[in-house]
Amino acid sequence: MNLMPLALAEAPAGGVAGWATGLVDTMGGPGAGLAIALENLFPPLPSEVILPLTGFAAGQGALSLVSALFWTTLGSVVGAVALYWIGVLFGRERMHRIWGRLPLVKSSDLVRTEEWFAKHGTKAVFLGRMVPIFRSLISVPAGVERMPMPLFLMLTTLGSLIWNSVLVLAGYWLGDQWDVVETYVGVLSKGVLVLVVVAVVAYVAVRLRSRSQARHRRAT
């Protein structure tokens, strides 16, 4: 007898949560892993919904806690590796060609970014797995810069395991209040997004100002 529908009876039926519930209901742990792999490839799918819901399902007996952590971490790694290979296929030369056509940027900016990643890439990949939004994006520059695959896999697995464990265990312990996690992580995600927007706006403003000053000096 399939106990999963009974175990997940209290889970919501619509939206991302309903979709993730259906995957776990149908496939168990592999379904949770598939949901997280897709979340890595399509960041608008929120891990702050999928992971606590998987923890709730584990608490209801739909799957074991070990299975929940294993499959969600495996899904994270699979999604990250796919993005890594997108970075590899994109390539450094193509990145430089595209960068050179963008307004308000210099080739030296990209060179400095590459140097920064070469120096801090291990920390960026490891910690980036625990930062909303950047969880997915960080895999692309790792591929562009050809970070050794064994190192990338180790850092991605460890970072993903920590992030997934926190959210899965939160859902496991909170039970039918698992959706509280989404509220708090959602606030964090919005905070990160605001910081990124502010940084981009500040960068553009500085670039425009420096260009204006350069034109003024040439005119005088």
Image (cartoon, rainbow, N blue to C red):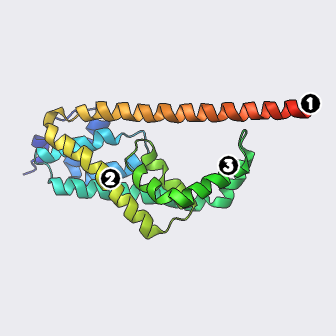
Mark 3 or mark 1, whichever is nearer to me: 1
Name the image quarter holding the C terminus: top right
Q: Residue at x 17, y 32 (%)?
A: 177
Badge 2 or badge 1: first in the primary sequence = 2
Badge 3 or badge 2: first in the primary sequence = 2
Which mark, residue 34? 2
- Indicate the secondary structure of the residue bearing disc 2: helix
- Give the CA distance from mark 3 to mark 2: 37 Å
Q: Is residue 32 left or right of residue 80?
A: left
Q: Is residue 99 left or right of residue 10?
A: right
- Name the foreground residue: 220 vs 42: 220
Q: Which residue is mark 1?
A: 219
Q: Residue at x 37, y 52 (%)?
A: 37
- Which quadrant holds residue 171? top left
- Name the foreground residue: 156 vs 91: 156
Mark 2 or mark 1, whichever is nearer to me: 1
- Give the CA distance from mark 2 to mark 1: 60 Å
Q: Amino acid at mark 1?
A: Ala
Q: Amino acid at mark 3?
A: Asp
- Give the CA distance from mark 3 to mark 1: 26 Å
- Which quadrant holds residue 9? top left
- Indicate the secondary structure of the residue bearing disc 1: helix
Residue 56 in view (yes/no)? no
Residue 11 in view (yes/no)? yes
